[in-house]
Image (spheres, rainbow, N blue to C red):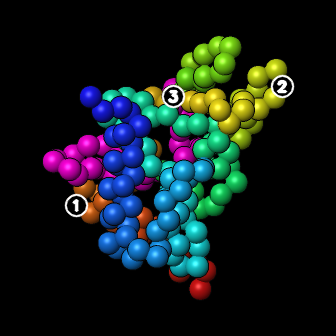
C-alpha cells in the first residue's frame, strides 16, 4: 500500500509534467521548501503548492503557511484523482483566504484542536508565539467547499492558471 507522501509526490510530478509540456523544462523548478513547484513565467516566479485530495483532508505545514504569507503569487493546486493516471485540478488563488473558511485542525506537540475558521494572518498563537514550522494543519475540504473555493476547468487542467497568468501579464504591461 502506498503512503500519503507517495501519492502526493505522484500528483506533484504529474502537475510538473503538465507545466513543463506547456512552458518548457527551464520554466519549472521542483522544490520542497515552501511551495512544491516554482513556475518562471511573465517575468515572475509563481509559487505553486500541490495538494493531493482523495478523501476529505489536505495537510498544510506551518512552513507552507508562512511561504503563502510572504510569497506572491502563491497558488495552491488541489489535485483529485480522475480517470486512469489523470487528475482533476482545482486552483486556489489565495489559499490563506480560501482555507480560512474551512474547518481546520491545528496540530501542536502538546494538543490538537479543531477550529471552524482560522485567521492565518493573525497566526495561531500558542503561548503567545507562532506555531513552529514543524507543526501542521489538517484542512477539511468537502466537495461543495472545494467547488466554492477553487477554479476548475475539467477540459484543461492548466486553463485557469493560463487565464491568471494572462491577467497579471497584461496588468504588468
Mark nearest the camera among 2 and 1 is 2
Marks 1 and 3: in contact by CB < 8 Å?
Answer: no
Q: Which residue is mark 3?
A: 138
Separation of marks 2 and 3 at Cα, in angstroms: 21 Å
Whether residue 140 appears in this view of the structure is: yes
Q: Which residues are magenta?
A: 77-103
What residue do we see at 36% from left, 39% from top?
Answer: 6
Direction bottom: furthest residue: 173
Taking 82 as reference, is 3 left or right?
Answer: right
Height in image: 126 above or below 27? above
Circle 3 crowding by C-alpha within 10 Å: few under 14, some 14–19, many from 20: some
Taking 98 as reference, is 131 left or right?
Answer: right
Q: Which residue is mark 1?
A: 155
Height in image: 88 above or below 41? above
Image quarter (top left, top right, bottom left or bottom right) of the C terminus: bottom right
What residue do we see at 60% from left, 16% from top?
Answer: 113
Q: Position of residue 160 (x, y in %)?
A: 38, 63
Direction right: furthest residue: 128
Whether residue 141 appears in this view of the structure is: no
Amino acid at each position: 500500500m502506498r503512503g500519503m507522501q507517495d501519492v502526493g509526490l505522484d500528483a506533484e510530478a504529474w502537475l510538473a509534467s503538465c507545466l513543463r509540456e506547456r512552458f518548457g523544462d527551464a520554466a519549472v523548478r521542483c522544490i520542497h521548501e515552501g511551495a512544491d513547484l516554482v513556475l518562471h513565467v511573465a517575468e515572475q516566479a509563481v509559487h505553486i503548492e500541490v495538494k493531493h485530495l482523495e478523501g476529505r483532508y489536505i495537510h498544510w505545514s506551518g512552513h507552507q503557511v508562512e511561504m503563502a504569507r510572504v510569497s506572491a503569487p502563491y497558488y495552491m493546486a488541489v489535485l483529485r484523482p480522475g480517470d486512469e493516471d489523470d487528475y482533476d485540478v482545482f486552483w486556489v488563488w489565495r489559499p490563506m483566504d480560501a482555507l480560512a473558511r474551512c474547518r481546520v485542525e491545528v496540530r501542536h506537540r502538546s494538543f490538537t484542536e479543531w477550529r471552524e475558521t482560522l485567521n492565518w494572518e493573525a497566526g495561531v498563537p500558542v503561548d503567545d508565539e507562532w506555531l513552529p514550522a514543524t507543526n501542521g494543519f489538517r484542512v477539511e475540504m468537502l466537495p461543495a467547499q472545494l467547488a466554492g473555493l477553487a477554479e476548475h476547468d475539467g477540459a484543461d487542467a492548466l486553463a485557469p492558471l493560463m487565464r491568471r497568468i494572462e491577467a497579471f501579464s497584461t496588468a504588468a504591461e
